Amino acid sequence: QVQLVESGGGLVQAGGSLRLSCAASGSILSIAAMGWYRQAPGKQRELVAAITTGGRSNYADSVKGRFTISRDNAKMTVYLQMNTLKPEDTAVYYCNAVMRLGSSLTGQGTQVTVSS
């Protein structure tokens, strides 16, 4: 069993920065990759960024060059550094863990609001 605890959301002005954290606990050796999704009001949930245990990462085109995903394997924590935030980045951000056996787990979400 894996548990995910997210933190770091909040309100920021356009152009500002925030860092999200997602700490995993429990059967962390079963985790193959972790990442962040987001869902804005009236829109579908979309993948923002993901990173494997080996450190390979990928990003949505809309955040490339502005967001950076990283992980601390010792703490089994994944970070999403978000710079040059835009109002369209406003959404609930969800941490996600993909297990080696194929299942996945999503956190409760943290609100990010970017004011113009």
Image (cartoon, rainbow, N blue to C red):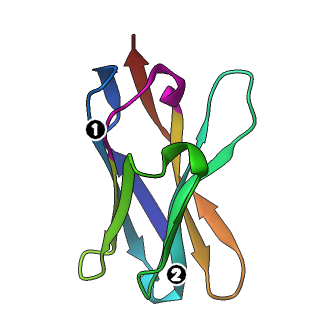
Whole-percent x, y for residue 8 in the image: 29, 41
| Circle nearer the N terminus (1, 2) | 1
- The residue wearing badge 2 is 31
Q: Residue at x 33, y 67 (%)?
A: 70
Q: Is residue 3 above or below residue 85?
A: below
Whole-percent x, y for residue 77 in the image: 32, 67
Q: Toward the viewer: 13 or 100?
A: 13
Kindly indicate whether the residue at mark 2 contacts the one at mark 1 (C-beta within 8 angstroms).
Answer: no
Q: Is mark 2 on a helix, strand or loop?
A: strand
Amino acid type assigned to the residue bearing label 1 in the image: Leu
Residue found at the very far top of the displayed protein: 116
The residue carrying pointer 2 sits among few (fewer than 14), some (14 to 19) or many (20 or more) residues within 10 Å by Cα, namely many
Q: How far apart are marks 1 and 2 (CA)?
A: 25 Å
- The residue wearing badge 1 is 18
In magenta segment, residue 4:
no
Q: How many discs mark residues in the rendered view?
A: 2
Amino acid type assigned to the residue bearing label 2 in the image: Ile
Q: Which disc number belongs to residue 39? A: none
- Residue extent of the magenta highlight: 82-91
Q: Is mark 1 on a helix, strand or loop?
A: strand
Q: In which quarter of the image is the C terminus?
A: top left
Q: Toward the viewer: 1 or 53?
A: 53
Residue 108, visible in the rendered structure: no
Q: Which residue is drawn at 58% across and 41% down?
A: 38
